[in-house]
Amino acid sequence: MIYIIASRELRNMFLSPLAWVILGVVQLIFGITFYPDVDSFMRQPHPAGLTAAVVSPLFGWVAILLLFVIPLLTMRLISEERRNKTLSLLLSAPLTMTEIVLGKFFGIVTYLLIMIAMLTLMPMSLLLGGTLDFGLMFMSAFGLILLLASFAAIGLFMSTLTQSPTLAAISTFGALFFLWILQLGSELADNGVLVYLSIVSHYLSFLEGVFNTADVAYYFLVIILFLVLSVRRLEGDRLGG
Amino acid sequence: MDMDNEILVDVKEVSRYYGQLAALESISFTMRKGEVLGFLGPNGAGKTTTMQVITGNLAPTAGAITIAGHDLLEDPRAAKGAIGYLPEQPPVYKELTVDEYLDYCAALNCIDRDKRTSARNASKEKCGLTEVGRRLIGNLSKGFQQRVGLAQAIIHMPPVVILDEPTVGLDPIQIREIRKLIRELGKDHSVILSTHILPEVQTICDRVQIINKGQLILSDTIDGLQKQLKSASITVAFLNMPHLDILNDIPGVNGVEEASPGYWRILFKPEQDPTDTLVKLSVENKWALRELRPGRVSLEEVFLQLTTSEHTETKTDKEIKTKKETKTEIAAGKDN
């Protein structure tokens, strides 16, 4: 059941130009930021090696870029169904709310996996003239997957709150941005709690190639929290008045 | 024969509140296999809420609903599997083709992968969609989108089909086609249909329920209803119209009203038919009776009577009083 909704969601995304355009534009921006890094490395090789000097900063960049992009992808998940009154198709089918929410979530995560796979192809081209630290690259990609999945869960929840996709996009962006800049605030106030709460601080260790269970747990907690909130919100629609 | 009388929908004392506002107040009814049940009521009476509660789109505040033997609250999966629902606005994805959409609906309703194509083709054929399978739903006319919605509701061959105002927004030809389709559906499925169009109920349904302000105020078969309506009045025309008081004094007569210019409707108690007395009096007093026929009160009149007169009177006195008060206040304000 989850698979059915997820695959429909994924195919629906590719029916609209939005998904294609986002893939294309992200790839283009990624390429533009990729080239100068490679160029400067060619002139003056970095002691940390090719992967640490070129690939990791790239993944850092892409996370910032996708902070702006994810809200556009998640905004229509539930809100558009609500506005077009197609949600009742799912609500009156023999499905549970959890299945509906998980289906939507995995649909968008699959899209993000495609995007990450395409982004990882670009550093792979360096193999033509050099060697890569696959362990570090894999960790960066793994961290990015977790980061984006938690973005998506937050976006999904925002999308359950409203009928208007635009509103969902803006609130998602606000929430993500807030979670992101918590880290800046912590630098000023020297507060460990803020660092811990910040969604980006946990990503940085992945970029250094460190697999920290605490960081993985953080992302899983965020994902589960917002998925549960989404389910509760949809149940609340049915019950409340 | 026992199977034919199986109760498919059993709604018991269902209420639904939106905060303080009661959208439904302890509604109870049952529906048997093979029935077409018409739900009639003015806009905002609670028709859509009832349908949403039965289909599990809304949870009832109180009460129990059983669909084909499965409790909707305790075993929602089985109960929902036995229902096909077409909401007021068909829940179609405009960017999909008819085939893609119906395949998705079939999958959502747990139809096995290898049976999906045949299920899709069967429901397409029933709804007259065979020609448009590969077209985008968004490019189809409103009537065809409505058919796609219907096809979606019956794709898993549910015993109960629930249709919320299925003919709204269609042109007269499309309305006729959809009605024909619903009558066809009534052969294999039990159908609950909501509408505020009265002739629709008269032409399609076996049984009618009138709902107003969240309460069920009438439940009868169409035949029974029409028989009852017919027997309780006659329409007459006289060349020399007698004084109304004379007619009113005939034993059994409840009231006399003008049906149309020159035609008078005489309402009477069903057990005391005054027709013979009336004819006799007419001959004796030379009223020159020109026409006499059983007065078919239309469903529309019953509907209006039930949903307007009685129930506006039950409005709390307080409300009326406050209205009067505000009026006098305004008047007083003008005087100043």
Image: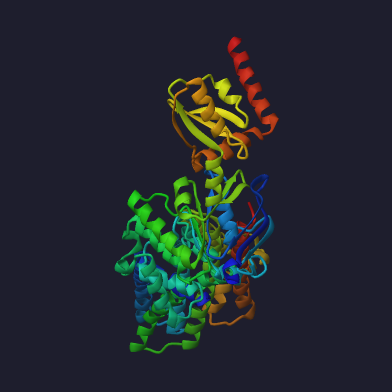
Left or right of A183 on screen, residue B258: left
Near-viewer residue (A167 or B119): B119
Residue A67, image x, y percentages: 48, 65
Near-viewer residue (A200 or B299): B299
Residue A52, image x, y percentages: 47, 81
Left or right of A121 on screen, residue A237: right
Q: Above or below — where is A217 with respect to A21?
A: below
* Structure colour scheme: rainbow
Near-viewer residue (A143 or B113): B113
- The residue furthest top is B336
Q: Above or below — where is B78 with respect to B269?
A: below
Name which quarter of the figure residue A229 lies in.
bottom right
- Residue A135 showing in the rendered view: yes
Left or right of B10 on screen, residue A117: left
Residue B22, image x, y percentages: 65, 46
- Residue A14 showing in the rendered view: no
Q: Above or below — where is A78 with respect to A34?
A: above
How many dots with numbers?
A: 0
Residue A216, image x, y percentages: 60, 77
Q: Above or below — where is A218 with respect to B186?
A: below
Near-viewer residue (A214 or A17): A17
Q: Residue at x 47, y 52 (%)?
A: B165
